[in-house]
Image: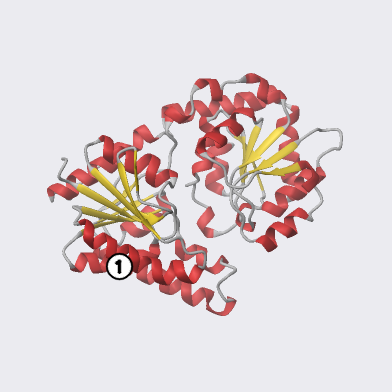
Amino acid sequence: MSACKVCILMSMNAPFHPRVYLKGCRTLVKAGYEVVIIAPHECDENRDGIQIRSLPVYRSRLGRLLVTPWLVFAKALREKASVYQIENIELIPQALLLRLLGKKVIYDVHEDTPDQVPFKTWVPPLIRKPLAWMVKKMEHFGARRFSAVIAAGVEIGERLGACNKQTTIVHNYPLLEEFVDSIALEPARHTGKKIICLGGISSAHAGREIVKAMGLLPRDLEAKLIFAGGIASPAYLDEVIRTPGWERVEYRGIISREQVKALMAEAAAALVLYSPEPNHLDIRSNRFYESLAAGLPVVTSNFPKWRELVEGNGFGLTVDPTDSQAIANAIEYLLTHPEEAAAMGLRGRQAVLEKFNWTREEPKLLQLYAQLLDGALSGPREGRTA
């Protein structure tokens, strides 16, 4: 197995993306593969047995879209890997060139990008729908020609499975070793008043509506919201800061994995809210499943699949993400019913222990790689879509 080199290609993300690095790459290394990541980063390094080949970090979107993919391609050719796995839709043209050169290529799909494009504020409104159509056509064209496709969710898997029968759904479930009992089962936190939202501050994550909800909470309820993650733009952040309720908010920016776990250990509940866009209707959220793993009751958007999972199993509450009063009511309920909130958190954690964990997903990834390298991708297997 040591002769099998896997090269992970990333143009838009840092190399330590949780799904890619913590789960996929470490799983492959543990199984005996040589793993190389080519990604924007400050320097070359070797971490956890994974070799990182750095690329310039472009701050401009134009640089990331037009220059970085070709830098990725140039470095990829030098690796002479057994398998190349792309993590960004922007790399499809370069991945197709690798296929023309006889390379095995896997497309790992995290987001339903064609459904995202119509909501991208940086795309001129007049071209959003035509661009979304073009992106879908390009994705389907590539998917038909790649060696295999990995999908992070059911809806993506079904759509691309119609293009490539070698499509495997590998869910973005948490690593159990990151969420030990001492983090998940501390009862005192449920009597506290700290709420966390780890998705950053953006309209896609209902940032303004969440802050407004904090302003609608009763004055005598000493609630505090901790935001962490990136921002959509400085202009959006300024707008949110001016929203009534910000005085009950603390924004910590982008934080480390250890800081994330520390916040989860202190929190009474987690907000995992998404705006009503097609890309958000399926459940692929890493922070949602990690919140469950940490034993936190959750407040999520009330989209059908989310409502069925969250309220159907008693993990938390679902609300209209555009309704700040509904968000405020859900927060108030969890903070004023600590015993029930704790029970919700324990049910969510138990579901992760039994089902929603990476231990159940990694065999699908390893089976795909083993069959691809053996040239035996045929017949049914667990995790494959029809």
* Residue 135, image x, y percentages: 42, 70
Decide if residue 140 is in sight here: no
Determine the image quadrant of residue 198: top right
Q: Position of residue 222 (x, y in %)?
A: 80, 33
On screen, 343 above or below 197?
above
Percent x, y of residue 358: 38, 35
**SS under mark 1:** helix
Q: Is residue 44 above or below residue 182?
A: below
Front in this rendered view, residue 290 or 275? 290
Q: Which residue is mark 1?
A: 94
- From the viewer's side, name the closer residue of 316 and 274: 274
Residue in the picture at 31% in, 43% down: 50
The quadrant of the rendering that contains the N terminus is top left
Q: Is residue 179 left or right of residue 36?
A: right
The quarter holding residue 340 reads top right
Residue depicted at 33% across the width and 68% down the height: 70
Report the residue that reaches farthest toward the bottom.
126
Instruction: Count the numbered circles shown.
Output: 1
Image-based side of 46 in relation to 307, left or right? left
Three-letter code for the amino acid on which mark 1 is drawn: Gln
Is residue 122 visible in the rendered structure shown here?
yes
